[in-house]
Image (tube, rainbow, N blue to C red):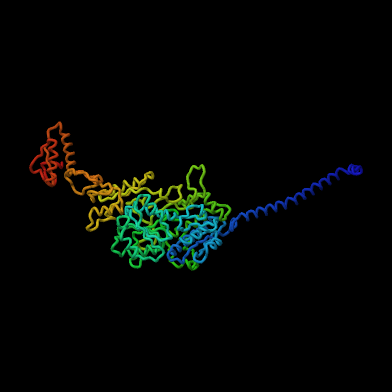
Amino acid sequence: MQEDIKRFLHVPFQELKRRFSLSRKKKRETRKMRVEPVALWLCVFVLLIHCINGHTFVQRPPVIKLGIYYNMSNPDISFDGVQLYAGAQAAVKELNDLQTVPGVTFELEYIPAATVSASNATSSVFAIVASDWYSSASLAQADAGFPVVGPRSLGDNVGVDSSYHMLSVRQPLSSESLMVLHNALNSEQTRSTAFVMVTRPFMNSSTFVSALASLSLPAPLEIALGSSPLDAASVLSQWSSGDPNNGNFVPTCGVFFTTQPDTSGILEAMYADLRFNMSQMRFYVVGPAAEGVWNSSSAGTAPFTRLRFVTSFSDPASGVNPLSQRYQSALSAWFADADMSALPADMTSRPLIRAPTYAGLEGYVGVRLVGETLSLMGLLNQTLFLEAVYRRRYLFLNDAMLGPFSDGCLIDSDISIPCSCNVGMRTAQLAMFSPTTGRAQHLPYDSYYDPNSVKLTEPVEECYLQLANLKFPLPFALWYDTLQVAMKAMSYHYNTDINHAGFASATYMPAIMQQRVNESLMAFEDRLYATRRPIAIIGDQFRTVHHHIANLYVSPTTEYIDADLQPATETSRYTWVMKPYLSELVHAVALHVADYYAARQPPVIFVGSDNAVGYRVAVQSLHTVQFAVEDGDATNVRHCCDVAAAECCG
């Protein structure tokens, strides 16, 4: 030890400094060699974690493939399938052209539901963006993390607890049923409370039936087709026999919870059946019954002119709606660029309409919902996509709002939305079938009628149309033509106030209901009450009524004097005479004249009348105020201007 100290003390200072510097350099190199492997392994670990947490797809894939799962082998629904495909392809092209999701290219694949199972379909694409009424049920059983957007579903599927991955873009069938009822009860062109309901087992009509019961209206006459082929003659026989639970009166309104061929066959047969006056009837189709082209072999589109359906979408051919205009541009761009010879064979089995269609707009909205949501995200996979939809609650496509999408109850929030909701479009509105092409089209609703009867939009915090959104009908039956404009204006104004519990409608009844040959007034009143159920009648159709209806009797001719009082009856209180008698008008004039001349010289009074009864009534009234009436040429004349001596035209 002492020797070591001596050697150290004899080492020069510069040598010590050199050795110390070498020692520090070696230590730094050693630390660097130890740190670099640690950083490398940390990066590898993070990448592994990302890969483990990711779904089937990588976090930012260069290509996202979407699918249409549709059974094109079913002729009842294949026409709409072709139009859905075109609308979806238009949206895919638009997403790619605009680079809505930077660095990602979208593709669309048609998956034939007739040959490919739902489990295999979901393994090949990022999401399904359209599916038919019957195949959607199998998709509902798919992996809860696989997005199914825009399904046409026979079940409501509005609760995300059981169908979290099913994102509907249209209102459920229960909403369609309620919109049908709202229009049928309140439309001035329908005004019906008696219904025939034609059903198939796969369609749920319970919402419609329960809604009628809640409004204290008669239950519909159900004609159940079962699983048998359609027998139109049997259906019409049951229909024309009337409803045994409603006085055997024939319902004037039909609602079809069935297929398009069923409805088409029944209405075509009815059009040729003299037992039915279809010009005074109304028909509605729900769900899959609204598919396809309506053109009969015997009468063209004529049997379907009074047929209506419900849609959640705006007019696809609109020139003012921003979403429709965007769809039109995208569709035109796709048609200009697409190679029609490369279309899947199934998509050439039915005509591809180059004009905007409701089905095409539906497919377009489904794809854009996916694309616009992904454009707001960083990492992209199926699980994160569903989480993003429900986390954002609402999504705007141009000026159309989708949502609320909700998967849980809000706590201590300043807004109220349902705990479970997976429905996009929030509107239910009426549409029709073109009398020239037979295809679905916008219903041009004249401003002469109340627009509130053909369109309902639920409040922003609600999910889908419910019975609570319907108002109690307040229908007025008019037989007084000159009152139409005033009554319509008052009812429209009343209906604009959302706080009113009722919905007023004024209908000119001769346009939709006529008294039959040899039908008594009492029988006509019974039929009116059973099939239309007004709360008030205005006009001269019924001098008295025996149902609980306020009958505001307006005489079409001059009545000179009130009839003698008659003993009160059980029903006489229902009728109010709304037109004053001539005796009352003349007496009011006589009292005014007497008051005016109370402090003056009594006047010379001439009375002109076109008949003796009117003259006598006026003279008697003037005598009550002690005024004499001048006799002579001024009496019993057709117009006072014919008597110069009266000077009543000056």
Q: Judge from the rendering whether residue 123 lies leftward or rightward of residue 432; answer left or right.
A: right
Q: Where is residue 309 in the image (x, y as percent from the top left)?
A: 39, 57
In the current view of this chain or complex, which residue is farthest to the top? 599
Picture coordinates of residue 91, whole percent (x, y): 49, 58
Residue 364 % position (x, y): 47, 58
Location of the N terminus (image quadrant): top right
User: Which of 427 and 540 lies nearest the eye of the viewer?
Assistant: 540
* Residue at x 39% of width, y 64% of height: 261
- Residue 104 lies left or right of residue 618; in this view the side is right
Residue 576 sits in quarter: top left
At horizontal 57% and vertical 57% (from top left) the residue drawn is 103
Instruction: Quadrant for the C terminus, please.
Output: top left
Relative depth, front residue between 491 and 357: 491
Point out the residue furthest to the right here.
Answer: 3
> In the picture shown, does residue 334 fall above or below 495?
below
Look at 35% across and 59% down and name the residue there: 307
Relative depth, front residue between 467 and 582? 467
The residue positioned 77% from the left and 48% from the top of the image is 28
> Residue 442's spot in the image, x, y percent?
38, 57
Can residue 135 be seen in the rendering of this structure? yes
Left or right, 193 with respect to 113, comes to: left
